[in-house]
Amino acid sequence: MSDHVKLDIHDGIGIVTIDRQEALNALDDAILAGLEEAFLALGRDPSVRAVILTGAGKAFVAGADIKAMARFTPVEAKAFAQRGQRIFTLIEDYPHPVIAAVNGYALGGGCELAMTCDIRIASDRAKAGQPEVNLGVLPGFGGTQRLARIMGRSAAKHLLFTGEVVGAARGLELGLFNEVVAPEALMGRCMEIAAVIASKAPLAVSGVKRAVNEGTDGPLAHGLALEAELFSRAFATLDQKEGMQAFIDKRPARFLGQ
Ligand code: DAK
């Protein structure tokens, strides 16, 4: 694994930590490569049921690396954006839930990274926003798209046009964060949520993620058709038989992910 991206896996929960504290975890090529490597490794490990993505130190991620970007030609900028978008999509499409533990600054590419995750739990010290307009650019890792989908176009445009950075409480009001907790409680709370998810039927949870991600941006009829298809596939799994038999037997279910 990359020097700046660590992956730990325990009890079905993967923890990915971005650790480049001297630059507040700013995203450079090495971190993008490390994130790709980590999520490909998670994808190969059948024991993993949920992932937590966080940053070391006082930042989640303070953005794409401005010092590296400052020298980009338009061609290099496009290649960087396409590479970042490909890796961010890999995280968004990872079949199990990904929880962002937003421990501090989540700015620009950092806010965009948190938005690829399914759930965002923030420390009360977190600060988030898309300040790219201060630098003469616009978001390049999906910020205009995902922010608007999460909080609505109007609230998203306000943040995107002004570059305003919001604190945890405002982020919660806007729907960017699911919960805000004390800094010392952040990882514990994320582990708690991940453990609940890990105890459920994994293929059913993956089906839910896919139905929401792929089904909610188009017409309702399309989303309902996708849900019906995924619902029917669940009846070809051992976990459906186990889950329903366990209910009838009045005992806890033991899910195998099959
Ligand atoms: N890039 C590089 N270095 C960064 C950085 C960043 N985004 N953020 C912080 N650092 C570095 C600082 O330069 C400093 O390094 P030294 O000077 O010590 O060498 C170190 O981290 C500590 O930062 P500060 O001294 O500034 O720490 P403070 O606590 O005083 O301030 C801060 C924290 C987060 C308020 C401040 O560092 C800050 O404003 N950082 C920049 C935040 C920001 O503007 N983020 C958005 C970046 S733009 C695209 C693809 C992607 C993107 C756009 C286009 N295409 C290819 C089209 C994405 C763009 C972005 O993410």
Image (cartoon, rainbow, N blue to C red):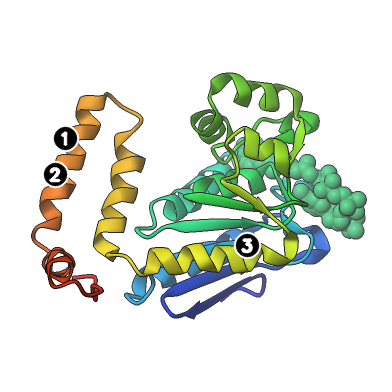
Query: Which type of secondary structure does the marked residue at label 1 adopt?
Result: helix
Tags 1 and 2 touching, CB below 8 Å: yes
- Image coords of residue 40 (percent x, y): 42, 67
Kindly identify the amino acid type of the residue bearing the numbered disc 3.
Answer: Thr
Tag 2 residue: 229
Whichever of labels 1 and 3 marks the residue nearer the N terminus, that label is 3
Q: Nearer the viewer, residue 85 or 181?
A: 181
Q: Residue furthest top?
A: 154
- Find residue 160 and report its image quarter: top right
- Image coords of residue 110 (percent x, y): 66, 48
Mark 3 and mark 2: Cα distance apart in space: 34 Å
Tag 3 residue: 54
Tag 1 residue: 225
Residue appearing at x 32%, y 75% in the figure: 46
Q: Quadrant of the C terminus?
A: bottom left
- Image coords of residue 246 (percent x, y): 17, 71
Residue appearing at x 21%, y 75% in the figure: 251
Kindly identify the amino acid type of the residue bearing the numbered disc 2.
Answer: Glu
Whichever of labels 3 and 2 marks the residue nearer the N terminus, that label is 3
153 sits left or right of 185 in the view = left
